[in-house]
Amino acid sequence: MGNLFGRKRRSRVTEQDKAVLQLKQQRDKLKQYQKRISLQLERERAFARQLLKDGRKEKAKLLLKKKRYEEQLLDKTENQISNLERMVQDIEFTQIEMKVIEGLKIGNECLNKMHQVMSIEEVERIMDETQEAVEYQRQIDEILAGSFTVEDEDAILAELDAITQEQIDLPEVPSEPLPEKIPETSPVRVEPKPELVAAS
């Protein structure tokens, strides 16, 4: 049927990944060998004990020599497994370090590009221009503040009060005079409802 999308996926497995996989496979094989030898040693020890019971001392001694040799092989196997595991850890840690270094490299490149866009001279120029603009505005404020007389200040305050008064919405004062005496009204009598009377 062919590839569904028309192109093959790129494998992301690196040479380091392959090396780690091979080391782990070798370690697993050694562990299997180690387990097999350990079981064999137990069987040989039991067999040597049986030979001694049967009075076959020389045969038992020969079997124990073989067992001793296999135990030494087992010790060597343990060392090899430790070496393989250490190597796997070293490779994996080096891969992490490489990723960190790659990240630092990308970060440095990004910073360098930003520094090229905004050089120290450019920053100093902008800061100088900003300082000049602030100083210019301060001078304008001083000129404006010093050019007003006392009468000008009073007129400004009066206009400010007038604007403030305009913003306050007060109710209109009635134009007709208030009556001198409020006419009395007869009290309104409320008749009870028939259903309420019946209920009581």
Image (spheres, helix red, strand yellow):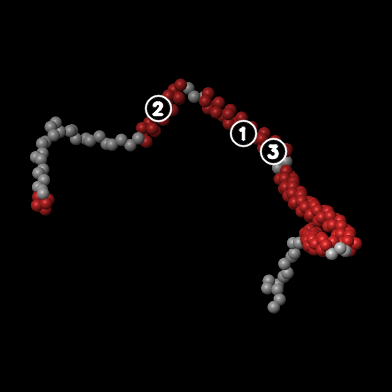
Q: Is residue 44 left or right of residue 134?
A: right
Q: CA distance from mark 3 to mark 1?
A: 15 Å
Quadrant occupied by the N terminus: bottom right
Whether 184 is drawn above or below 75: the answer is above
Identity of the residue drawn at 11% across and 51% down: 199
Q: Nearer the viewer, mark 2 or mark 3?
A: 3
Identity of the residue drawn at 69% across and 38% down: 123
**From where the camera sits, is residue 148 visible?**
yes
Q: Is residue 35 left or right of residue 190?
A: right
Q: Position of residue 140 (x, y in %)?
A: 56, 29
Identity of the residue drawn at 72% across and 67% down: 9
Upstream in the sequence, badge 2 or badge 3? 3
Q: Position of residue 66 (x, y in %)?
A: 88, 61
Pointer 1 residue: 133
Identity of the residue drawn at 72% across and 43% down: 115
Circle 2: residue type:
Ala
Whether 165 is drawn above or below 17: the answer is above
Circle 1: residue type:
Ala
Whether 15 is drawn above or below 176: the answer is below
Upstream in the sequence, badge 3 or badge 1? 3
Circle 3: residue type:
Val
Task: Give neighbour class at mark 1: few <14, some 14-19, many 20+ (Cα, 10 Å).
Answer: few
Pointer 3 residue: 123
Q: Position of residue 109 (x, y in %)?
A: 75, 48
Q: CA distance from mark 2 to mark 3?
A: 46 Å
Pointer 2 residue: 158
* Mark 1: secondary structure: helix
Location of residue 181 by image quarter: top left
* Mark 3: secondary structure: helix
